Amino acid sequence: MKDTSPSPHPGTGAPFDGNVILIDDMPFRRAQLKAFLQTWSDQVHLPVIGIDAAQVTSVDTAIMLILSLGTALVGKPQASLLEEIKTRLPDVPIVVLAESVDTANIQAAFELGVRGYIPSTSEPNVALSALTFVLEGGHYFPPGTLMNESA
């Protein structure tokens, strides 16, 4: 018989509780990302639920939110969405997936309180490890992107 008890949170022994919510307004890209995340989802024993941004208001609980921006930059619409998410689910870590590797964009995401930023230039194993790291309480941003240029 298969064990259906919650999986322990890696490194702590505490069980995970909830879903990982993947937010992307593009249905095809959302399906691709969900398929990519399936192995990771199975490893951490958490379902990944894909929604579009308009459905965020229906999310009452989550263990993590993954916001896929594609080619969009972290601008006013994304800032408003992030603020809404942080108001509704203040303790839920948010990870941004994006095409942009622009330091200003990554810093803007950090300033808005996201716990991770994974550019699409990342190696797949790095991206999945970063998600696990954030899930366990860490922060992940591409190396060197949050360094103070005046230092």
Image (cartoon, rainbow, N blue to C red):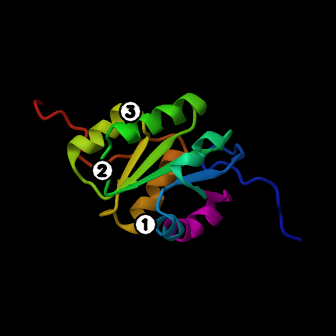
Q: Nearer the viewer, residue 10 or 18?
A: 18
Which residue, given by chain and number where applicable, does mark 3 sit on? 112
Tell me which segment is drawn in magenta.
Answer: 33-49
* Point 49% across, 53% down: residue: 131
Amino acid type shown at disc 3: Leu
Which residue, given by chain and number where applicable, does mark 1 sit on? 125
* Point 25% across, 53% down: residue: 101
* Point 21% across, 45% down: residue: 103
* Point 55% across, 45% down: residue: 136
Counting residues from the start of the chain, the first of labels 2 and 1 encountered is 1
Q: In the image, residue 33 lies at what x, y percent? A: 49, 66
Q: Is residue 48 left or right of residue 17?
A: left
Counting residues from the start of the chain, the first of labels 3 and 1 encountered is 3
Instruction: Please determine whether, in this image, residue 76 is positioned above or below residue 24.
Output: above
User: Which mark's residue is nearer the viewer, 3 or 1?
Assistant: 3
- Pick the quarter of the image with the N terminus: bottom right
User: Which mark's residue is nearer the viewer, 2 or 3?
Assistant: 3
Q: Is residue 41 left or right of residue 94?
A: right
Instruction: Please determine whether, in this image, residue 64 is positioned above or below residue 112.
Output: below
The residue furthest left is 150
State the CA–CA distance, disc 2 to disc 3.
16 Å
Name the secondary structure under disc 3.
Answer: loop
Name the secondary structure under disc 2.
Answer: loop
Which residue, given by chain and number where applicable, does mark 2 sit on? 142
